[in-house]
Image (spheres, helix red, strand yellow):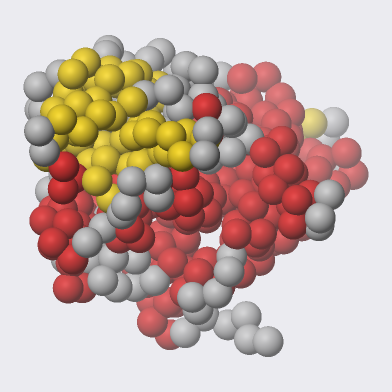
Amino acid sequence: MDFEFTEELKAFQMTVRKFAEEELAESVEELDEKHEFPYEEVSKMADLGLLGLPIPEEYGGEDAGYLAYAIGVEEVSRISASLGITMAAHTTLGCMPIKVAGTEEQKKKWLPSLAQGKMLGCFGLTEPDAGSDAAGVKTRAVLEGGEWVINGTKCFITNSGTRISGLVNVAAVTGEKNGRKEISNIVVPHGTPGFEVAPAYRKMGWNSSDTHELSFQNCRVPEENILGKPGDGLKNFLITLDYGRIGVAAQSLGIAQACLEASVEYAKTRVQFGKPIGKYQGISFKCADMDMEVELSRTAVYKAAWLADQGRDFSREAAIAKLYASETAMRAASNAVQIHGGYGYIEDYNVCRFFRDAKILEIGEGTSEIQRIVLARRLGL
């Protein structure tokens, strides 16, 4: 087994880290405070090729693979979770349904603009009554006169309301077969009549990320906008969610790493009772545990991404990585705040933002409970 990065991946990691520290970090706090979407920063990320890392070159992407993608999301999230989720949701939820199930014509039509960051993509799966129960989708699409007529509501949709949002991959019921819902994925471009975006949610964290409820009222799109065959939607969006879990796991890793770095630095400089607090076991053991869990998370994330690059089954590994890394991020953020004491509760310190941003990682792309169900079923339980 070789855990060493190639020279190309090492160079890529250093490039993204330097870029994130020098080009993104300065504006993060202000954008978070103002709840403003980072248009300039996203544009810079697009220029660096970060919005199309696993997309083939023939469709405008970098063809860099999923390990490079995971590294990129990790390094960006280490500086800003809002930018990390913007990048991850766009790539896996916006691009991957088209890459996985799209025809050659569909890929050539939509992927280049997505991969080059000329527009952002999103995925309309979650509904008010269909979250963890993805098969409970109620949005319907009926074929009339060569068009899909879509009616329904989606909620908690990332990248759905910016001025550069371009399309949403909508999961909708298109019929029934053997008494079961036939769910399909249909591409709906922004600006289509009947497609409305509600005001942005007020969230606990990810304040610079864009999140909205979407509604479709007799929204009509061409019949050829369906991805795959009618009824393929459930299978295809489960594949998409596996890729998405690599992205969330990588975000979690980036936040946990940032918490570790901030905690160690503070523990070395904060003096109480005549010596740095890092000299006390109560603090040093917290940092040691954090270091251990971050390293184990990194191994899990990179393994899942590597398996995806090899074209092998990575569903189990993606669930493990997402589950362990997200819970690691939450523990790391909580401990980082504790180590910082009262200062950790003050917005002037980054660990306060890390704490707010970490919780959603245990929820999005399948809750921790759902990941445990996935893993238990793989054990035949």
Position in image of residue 327 (x %, y %):
70, 41
The quarter of the rendered structure image containing the N terminus is: bottom right
Residue 131 lies, with reference to residue 178, above or below; the image says above
Q: Is residue 101 left or right of residue 262?
A: left
Residue 2 lies, with reference to residue 23, above or below; the image says below
Residue displayed at 40% across by 50% down: 232
> In the rendered image, is residue 266 in sight?
no
Residue displayed at 41% across by 62% down: 69
Residue 23 lies, with reference to residue 275, above or below; the image says below
- Front residue of 212/267: it is 212
- Front residue of 297/274: it is 297
Q: Is residue 59 left or right of residue 271?
A: left
Position in image of residue 74 (x %, y %):
48, 55
Residue 371 sits in quarter: top right
Residue 222 sits in quarter: top left
Query: Which residue of the protein is positioned furthest toward the front in this rendering?
Result: 178
Position in image of residue 202 (x %, y %):
40, 13
Query: Which residue of the protein is positioned furthest toward the right in this rendering?
Result: 281
Residue displayed at 22% across by 61% down: 103
Tally the marks. 0
- Front residue of 106/299: it is 106
Residue displayed at 27% across by 40% down: 186
Position in image of residue 217 (x %, y %):
21, 16
Q: Is residue 200 left or right of residue 273?
A: left
